[in-house]
Amino acid sequence: AQSVTQLDSQVPVFEEAPVELRCNYSSSVSVYLFWYVQYPNQGLQLLLKYLSGSTLVKSINGFEAEFNKSQTSFHLRKPSVHISDTAEYFCAVSEVGGGADGLTFGKGTHLIIQP
Amino acid sequence: NAGVTQTPKFRILKIGQSMTLQCTQDMNHNYMYWYRQDPGMGLKLIYYSVGAGITDKGEVPNGYNVSRSTTEDFPLRLELAAPSQTSVYFCASSYSRQDGYTFGSGTRLTVV
């Protein structure tokens, strides 16, 4: 069975500074990897995903994540954050060829942008 | 498109009461899921369905029941509500496992 560890429960960062949110996963088979964002009092929204191919994936709002198989990591980065990026970020994993019982989510990282 | 619609948005229940959380999607997705979200704990899978008439238990199914009579609807039933069921409940759907999920806006339930 797969598992996900988000190493930081909270990450404070100043506006316009770079940020990295860390995610490590555990699985004995190939995986699909996802990052979701949850703004206050809203549901989760898909930010980006890795299925196969290029290990660097990007979102439309400037975030990117890199799949590192040897490190079993899928860290999320943004070179310059904005106050509107304040949200909870969840990393999730699904095993390729696995059952239909859905994604396994990490516990989330709260990104706090300070002006 | 409305996407995934959950009702109600908020509810307060007394211990021992029952209720149904409604979830409907208009994207013709076969896969549907119910998760609960507790502070600092991420999301835990309660039940899921791969199509009309087919449901299965997730990680934390005790105290809940589901049905899937149509592709669009996937209601979650709480019988004999307990304080441990105080949580935010999210319904989600997907076309395939690779697509990722579309989430509803959630139901915040308090059991007192």
Image: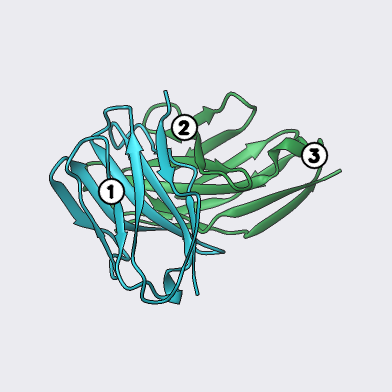
Chain colours: A green, B cyan
Label 3 marks a residue whose chain is A
**Pick the front one: B26 or B20:** B20
Label 2 marks a residue whose chain is A
SS for tag 3? loop
Residue underneath mark 2: A55
Q: Which residue is drawn at 52% across and 48% down?
A: A90
SS for tag 1? loop
**Could you say which quadrant of the image residue B97 lies in?**
top left
Residue underneath mark 1: A29
Q: Does A47 appear above or below B92?
A: above
Q: In this view, does B72 lie to the left or right of B41?
A: left
Residue A78: % across, % down: 67, 35
Q: Which of marks 3 and 1 is in front?
A: 3
Neighbours of disc 1 within 10 Å: few (<14), some (14-19), many (20+):
few
Calculate the distance from the C-alpha at mark 1 to the C-alpha at mark 2.
Answer: 17 Å
Residue A9: % across, % down: 62, 60
**Pick the front one: A10 or A29:** A10
N-terminal label among 2 and 3: 3
Amino acid type shown at disc 1 = Val
Label 1 marks a residue whose chain is A
Calculate the distance from the C-alpha at mark 3 to the C-alpha at mark 1.
Answer: 36 Å
